[in-house]
Structures are given as C-alpha cells and as structure tokens.
Amino acid sequence: MKNRASGPEGVQLQQSEAGFTLMEALIAMMILTFGIIAVTNLMIVAASSNSVANQATAAATIAAQRLEQLKAVPFNDARLNPGGSVTSDAAGFFTSPDDMVPGVGQIHTRWQIVAVDPQVRFIRVRSEGTGALSVSRSRAEFTTLRACTTASLGC
C-alpha cells in the first residue's frame, strides 16, 4: 500500500506529489540571496581594482614623461639646480598642476632634484592618482642620475 497524505478538503495525495514546503522555499531563497550578495561584492571589488589599475598606468606614464622632460633640460639650466628659478615645498619637491587624464581622473606629479656633487644631480619623479582609494595604490616613482660631461657647460 502506498503512503498517502491528506490534502485540502480530504483529497488524498501521494507523498511524492506533496511539493515544496514553506521551509524548503525559504531556505532556497536564502541560499540564492547569499549567492547574489557574493557576486555583487565581487563586481564591486573588480570595478574598484580596475579603476586603481587605470590610475596606476596613467601615473606611470606621466611620471615617465616628466622624467624624460627633466632629462632633456640642459645641465646648466636653473631648473636642474636646487634653489634655482623654481620654488619647492618644505621637503624639496617641485610640483606642477595635476594632469587630467580622460576616463581616469587627475594625476598628481611632483619631483625632487638633489645635487650629489657639482657635476651630478639625482632626480626623483613621483606620480599618483588622486582618488580616495587609489592614492598609495597607484603611485609610480622613477629615479635617475644626471651628470655633466661637457666642459663647455662649466663642469
């Protein structure tokens, strides 16, 4: 004899046809909700990481450009002499207006020039994104030494 359950108004149902209970439906909805929350969190982290990566790439590009510009300046130019025609902040860093990169945002760049001796300059260039989450994570820093090798420049 088959196992039978009693349905509404005395209708006899087989046990296999009874369907989901309310508790099973609630548990399934809870599992689905936690899955959706996890995927949403993953999307937020991915978007944030993508934004930081874009700012880091832009910062590295702008820092490299600024370093190349400073390397192209003649050695006896006042811009390569600490205390020359450009004023620096208390830490000895020079700054320029922030670069606006379309689709990325503002990139802040500063550089420092230190006279190692009369014929050698140490140049450090640092760029970083200005976003709240990306300032330290998008930082790019390049350094180089410039030496005066031409006697006509007064070395």
Image (spheres, helix red, strand yellow):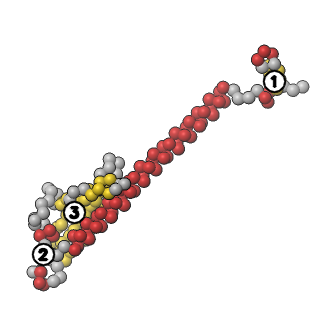
Q: Residues within 10 Å of mark 2 (few under 14, many from 20)?
A: few
Of the 4 image quadrants, the one containing the N terminus is top right
Q: Residues within 10 Å of mark 3 (few under 14, many from 20)?
A: many
The answer to the question of whether label 2 and label 3 lie on touching residues, with beta carbons closer than 8 A, is no
| Numbered tag placed on residue 76 in the rendering | 2
Q: Which residue is mark 1?
A: 13
Amino acid under disc 3: Trp
| Viewer-proximal residue among 146 and 69 | 69
Mark 2 lies on a secondary structure that is loop
Q: Residues within 10 Å of mark 1 (few under 14, many from 20)?
A: some
Residue 143 in the image, given as x and y percentages of width and height: 26, 68
Which residue is at a point 80% across and 27% down the rendered structure image?
15
Amino acid under disc 2: Asn
Picture quadrant where residue 113 is located: bottom left
Gap between marks 2 and 3 measured at Cα = 18 Å
Q: Quick check: 143 above or below 3?
A: below
> Left or right of 112: which side holds 134?
right
The earlier-in-sequence mark between 2 and 3 is 2
> Left or right of 17: which side holds 68?
left
Q: Which residue is mark 3?
A: 111
Mark 1 lies on a secondary structure that is strand
Mark 3 lies on a secondary structure that is strand
The answer to the question of whether label 2 and label 1 lie on touching residues, with beta carbons closer than 8 A, is no
Picture quadrant where residue 29 is located: top right
Gap between marks 2 and 1 measured at Cα = 98 Å
Which residue is at a point 39% across and 52% down the rendered structure image?
51
Tell me if I can see residue 138 in this picture.
no
Which residue is at a point 42% across and 52% down the rendered structure image?
49
Residue sitting at the far bottom: 151
Q: Quick check: 106 above or below 26?
A: below
Residue 127 in the image, given as x and y percentages of width and height: 28, 59
> Left or right of 25: which side holds 141?
left
